[in-house]
Image (cartoon, helix red, strand yellow):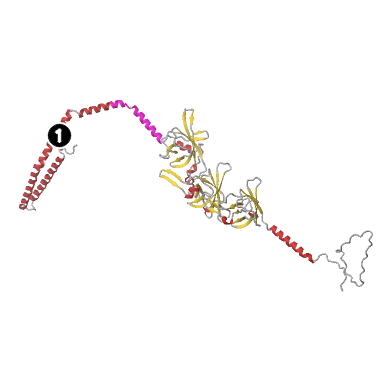
Amino acid sequence: MSEARLPDPDLAVPPEAPPAARPPISPPELPPDLPEAEVAARGRLSSVWLIPLLALVIGGWLAWKSYSERGPEIQIAFKSATGLQAERTKVKFMDVEIGQVTGISVSPDLTHVLVKARLLAGSERYLTDGTRFWVARPRISATEVTGLETLLSGPYIAIDPVTAGDSRREFIGLDTPPLVTTAEPGKHFVLKADSLGSLNIGSPVFYRAIQVGQVVSYELDPDDQGVSIRVFVSAPYERLVLTNTRFWNASGIDVRLTTEGIKVETDSLLSILIGGVAFENVRTLEAEGNPAPDNQTFPLYASQEKASETIYTRRVSYLLYFEGSVHGLEIGAPVMVRGIKIGQVLDIRLDFDPDHRNIQIPVLIELEPERIDDAPEVAAGEEGDIMAELVVKGLRGQLKPASLLSGKLYVDLDLHPKARPAVLDRRGELAVIPTVPAPLDDIANKVSSLLGKLETLPVEEIGEDLRDAIRGAKGVLTSAALTNALVELEASLRTLRSAAQVVDAQTLPKLGAAVDQVRATFKAAQEVIAPDTALYHDIKRALAELSTAARAIRDLAEYLERHPEALIKGKGAR
């Protein structure tokens, strides 16, 4: 038997409004045995609500975790966005992905593009004003080829993080990647020069012809009077840079004409093409310096020769007045003392002396007293100055040729004891060192003096006397008496020659025969006279003397044959 169910009041459809004349409908009667429902009071929170509450908590935790782990968002300004794509281009450090580009837009002034990127959490401490960004793509330079891996993977944004500095979120991207990153060990140094020369970014830095670093940047000084060049020396070579290290420009080829000939110097073919910097620890009497700290500033010399010169800080200026020509003397010419440089020429002028109505040439020089060991203080002409004492003893300035080929001059300071007495004069604030004529000028003056003396000689009278003497000598030589004397002398010589021939042809053979006879007689007598008797020895001595006389006669005849004039003039006459 089916139970009768009461209609649900919530689901019942309300009847249409009865017309006004319709009578009310009474509810049906229920059976007397129908059970009644018991109403029970519910709790405040049902267990069914635990599931959505748990899901809400987990979702909130995930949202908070995602927000808390989200890295910083940065904005980088580039000149162009070539190859960059939103949601695809990565941000990498040492080939490790640390972020991604989220958006690319054009700046309001239409001069560059703004690239937004989201980095990983924990990157905040690397985003400082020293951090650098650039687009890594294939690049070819004079020193290296980089970015070849991006040919397949596409360009990406590289970062050079720096922890030191103020925190930033907006950056200006580099046009080219930096040559040296903060991760590379080494030191940076700043070189000061008058001009950049042939140096450029990437130019090598050499130490004894070995590349140990490179030029990383350059810029004009704030006063626009010089250039600051930043170089990086890689580890472990940075320890070679000391506080007194000398840097010089090793670019191109250095050709110099010296007394030994033509000298050509260069570091490498690479330095010829793109320039280069070299450094060395010059050995001097000074103590060796300490290792230079990072960002130490050094002067950049024009050449190795300039860098090898000792640096002196104290300088004293003097004036020298020259009367002769100073052609060949240039600004920067050395001032020497016995072959050692102690200064240089600063200025050369042309001055008119109204007192003497004469033109003078003042030359301003600069001396470095520290070049002279144990030298007393030089006070530029003050009382007790050592220069004043040296001038009294004969210190003078003189122009001398530095090279006969180039014709250049230098100022030589030396003691001239025979120079005219002088003292250390003053012109305004400068002391004036007296001068002596140059060696060539002195020779010219002596030649001029000699020519003046020659002009005072009675040349015409001397010429007439000489002419008369030559005329008299000519008369003697052409006289008849001299001719007759020569003829008689020639006849005498012919007679003497004939007599010598007779002596040689007749007398000498007879004399030889006489000697033979005597020798035979002596032999016969030797057979008669005993060898131990006195007569034997006397005869032997007489024969020896006779033999000597024969030889003397023979020598006389030979001499007369060669010199027949000896019969008239005597032996040895010419």
Q: Nearer the viewer, residue 165 or 329?
A: 165
Q: Residue at x 52, y 33 (%)?
A: 428
**Can you say which quadrant of the picture contains the N terminus?**
bottom right
Residue at numbered disc 1: 490
Counting from the top left corner in percent of width and height, residue 394 is at: 44, 36
Count of picture labels? 1
Residue 295: in magenta span: no
Q: Residue at x 45, y 47 (%)?
A: 265
Q: Nearer the viewer, residue 443 or 433?
A: 443
Residue type marked 1: Glu
Residue 445: in magenta span: yes
Counting from the top left corner in percent of width and height, residue 102 is at: 65, 54
Answer with left or right where residue 200 lies relative to residue 35: left
Magenta residues, dominant SS class? helix
Magenta residues span 439-463
Answer with left or right where residue 49 lies relative to residue 290: right
The relative height of residue 427 versus residue 530 in the rendered view (above or below) is above
The relative height of residue 269 versus residue 421 in the rendered view (above or below) is below
Answer with left or right where residue 541 lies relative to residue 164: left
